[in-house]
Image (cartoon, coloured by chain):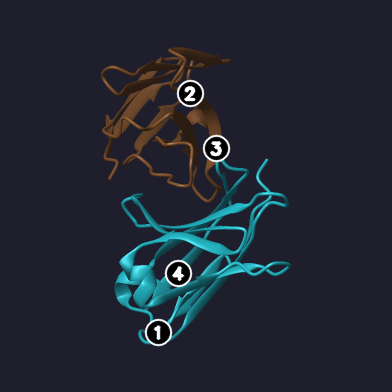
Chain colours: A brown, B cyan
Amino acid sequence: GEQVEQLPSSLIVQEGASVLINCSYTDSASVYFPWYKQEPGKRLQFIIDIRSNMERKQNQRLTLLFDKKTKHLSLHITATQPGDSAIYFCSPGTGGYKVVFGSGTRLLVSP
Amino acid sequence: NSKVIQTPRYLVKGQGQKAKMRCIPEKGHPVVFWYQQNKNNEFKFLINFQNQEVLQQIDMTEKRFSAECPSNSPCSLEIQSSEAGDSALYLCASSPHNTEVFFGKGTRLTVV
């Protein structure tokens, strides 16, 4: 089955810094790549996605880069704020019913 | 904003007891998922449904876990005989299919 690895597992940055979260997957059939954010006590929240026919997608302070050849994604968050503190998950999927999650990256943004 | 509703938010059961949790998926979403998230934040897929029919489930689900998604009623996940290792956050999610998944807030089960 699909294996998903996220690195780093945790990040601590000062407010205003940029961060990069990496995600690698193994299943070449994966075509849809949403990312989710999980804050303590809150539900997982969709933040950005990309499909396999794209290389880059931006949504405000979030930029998602996708390399189909290397099966690798990078989530770039600029101008981080304390409210960005959460666990971030990538979730490669084949576009069907199979949804898997990476191991998560815990981000802590200190004021 | 997700409208997936899970109840109860917290559940405490003794070993060997039944534990049942419910989920109301978003209206119009044909696909429903159940996941178990452990204290290391790792997700374990349990089962998914499309329009009340089971699509996939893991072995664990087949043995001690049972789940259903009847029409016009909440979906449910039940552990027949709870074990300490079942203590986790149980997440229900629904999807319109081939797009992002919308999650509930989860039911935190503690087996004492």
Report crowding for label 3: few under 14, some 14 to 19, many 20 or more residues within 10 A (C-alpha). Answer: some
Residue B8 spot, x, y in % from top left: 59, 69
Residue B41 spot, x, y in % from top left: 36, 49
- Look at 42% across and 82% down and name the residue there: B80
Q: Residue A106 occupies which quadrant of the picture?
A: top left
**Which chain is disc 2 placed on?**
A
Q: Please determine whether, in this image, residue A97 is positioned above or below residue A50.
A: below
Q: Secondary structure at mark 1?
A: loop
Q: Earlier in the sequence, mark 3 or mark 1?
A: 1
- Look at 40% across and 32% down and name the residue there: A108
Q: Please determine whether, in this image, residue B104 is positioned above or below residue A89.
A: below
Which mark is in front, 3 or 1? 3
**How far, Cα to Cα, is label 2 from label 4?**
35 Å
Residue B38 spot, x, y in % from top left: 35, 57
Q: According to the image, label 2 marks what residue?
A: A51
Report crowding for label 2: few under 14, some 14 to 19, many 20 or more residues within 10 A (C-alpha). Answer: some
Q: Earlier in the sequence, mark 1 or mark 4?
A: 1
Q: Secondary structure at mark 3?
A: loop
